[in-house]
Amino acid sequence: MSVHILVMDGNWHWQPRLRDISPGAGTAVLCRASDLKWADELRGVTAVVGLADDLPVEHWVAAAQHLHQEWRIDVIASLNDRTQDRTAAVAQALGLPFHHPDTVAWVHDKHRMRARLASAGVERVKCAQPTTLEELGDFFTEVAGPVVVKPTGGHASRGVTVVRTREELPAAWQHAWGEATSWTGDYPPLVEEYVPGPEYSVETLTHRGVHHVLAVTEKTSDPVARVETGHVIPARLDGRRESALIAHTRSVLSALNIRFGLTHTEVIDSPNGPVTVETHLRKGGDQIEDLVREAAGVDMADLYLRQLTGQDIGELEVLRERRSHPVYRAAAAIRYLAPDRHGVLAGIDGWQEADAEPGVMRSGQLVPDGTRLAGLKNSDFRLGFVRVCAPDAERAVSRADHALGKLTVRWAE
Ligand SMILES: Nc1ncnc2c1ncn2[C@@H]1O[C@H](COP(=O)(O)OP(=O)(O)O)[C@@H](O)[C@H]1O
Ligand SMILES: [Mg+2]
């Protein structure tokens, strides 16, 4: 019997792959009107409904109920942070499986995630959601050390500041408030104790409650802007620390009641053990899907789509061998050109030379010539990237650095 999937985001590009895996699969799309601009693949789509981005959830439920009556929806999918809260509400109303609304709320609201992980006994990070600058000051006094001020529902490192002295608090407070409106609502900023240590992300695919670890990614960030400047898989970790990170991530995912699907969990390996930064109900950005494919030989989209169509993917060899630990066959890295600079970008030279370096898989400019840049404010201010593969992580990192070194940025002013 063919499956009919209600897709509640703008991820159109995987629909042809879905039909390769499950030729009879049908899709209907219920998305935000602003996502309609991605509608470049309409073959085989039964219906497309676009709703004004800010319509309250009951309209989403009503539209989905109508589609369900007309075409009997079997499964609901959303890999986009923007619509997962509505997707969870629709799934509940239609009695179809998806993440529970609480899971979506815990994942998207970093303050609620902290509260949930603390009450589940997984980890305890000092944090608060002050309503005034004075309350923020009180928290800073209480912690007696550096703190991080960031938006509660943030993304792309927007509005994040590491604060080390009391004098820095007002600017950090304002910076975070500037990004207070998130995709799922408005929240006052979050302040947390600063957790020291190297950062990683754990890429997982959960099937029937079992968290399969596809890769552990090592990340580098700009020390001030906290913008991610590179990733390498596999992370260069000894076996004991890798096991601790994986075990911790599994308990985080279980505490958040994640029973299926792809997740991307950011973790700091602190002197007191692993601490979560955030997680997502989707794959990681920054081409991590490509890094996983090149380093681990796993096609995340293929597995996710098979899961969506009802296949018992837990029995596939590729997941059976990853029940406890990731398995790698090579390494892959991405490095970003991310200067913290003000000025107008005149151009970037050296792409051909960079592409000729060993192991380069892909490179590209991310902002057009002529863009006015005002420092490394967030991930969107990264100028370009190179992605490489190599036999091991050490060589992947040095290849990426070499290739990146071939690029020269020209500034107009
Ligand atoms: N409590 C914390 N301790 C130390 N660093 C943090 C903390 N919270 C955030 N950071 C740093 O800021 C970065 C961005 O924070 P994050 O919550 O991941 O925001 P975003 O959703 O924008 O990625 C993290 O990758 C990490 O480098
Ligand atoms: Mg993050």
Image (cartoon, rainbow, N blue to C red):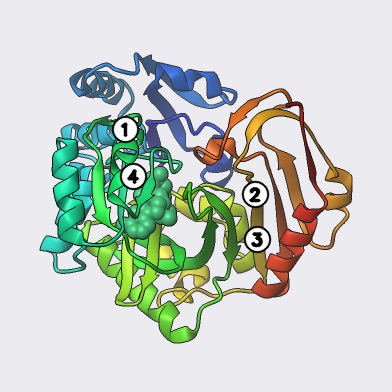
| Marks 2/3: CA–CA distance | 10 Å
Residue at point 37% right, 24% down?
30
Q: How many C-alpha atoms fall within 10 Å of the one at disc 1: few (<14), some, or many (≥20)?
A: some
Q: Nearer the viewer, mark 1 or mark 4?
A: 4
* Image mark for residue 174: 1
Any atom of ligand 1 within 8 Å of the CB at mark 3?
no
Q: Nearer the viewer, mark 4 or mark 2?
A: 4
Identity, as a three-letter code, of the amino acid under mark 2: Tyr
Q: Earlier in the sequence, mark 3 or mark 4?
A: 4
Work out whether residue 260 can be spotted.
no
| Residue lying furthest front | 167
Identity, as a three-letter code, of the amino acid under mark 4: Glu
| Marks 3/1: CA–CA distance | 35 Å
Image quadrant in which you'd find residue 5: top left
| Marks 1/2: CA–CA distance | 27 Å
Secondary structure under tag 2 reads strand
How many numbered circles are shown?
Answer: 4
Secondary structure under tag 3 reads strand
Q: Percent from the top left, x then y, of residue 259? A: 28, 57
Q: Percent from the top left, x then y, of residue 303? A: 49, 55
Identity, as a three-letter code, of the amino acid under mark 1: Gln
* Image mark for residue 320: none
| Marks 4/2: CA–CA distance | 28 Å
Name the residue carrying label 4.
Answer: 168
Mark 4 and mark 2 residues within 8 Å of each other at the beta carbon: no
Q: Nearer the viewer, mark 2 or mark 3?
A: 2
Secondary structure under tag 1 reads helix
Left or right, 249 with reference to 35: left
Q: Earlier in the sequence, mark 4 or mark 2?
A: 4
Q: Earlier in the sequence, mark 1 or mark 4?
A: 4
Name the residue carrying label 3.
Answer: 333
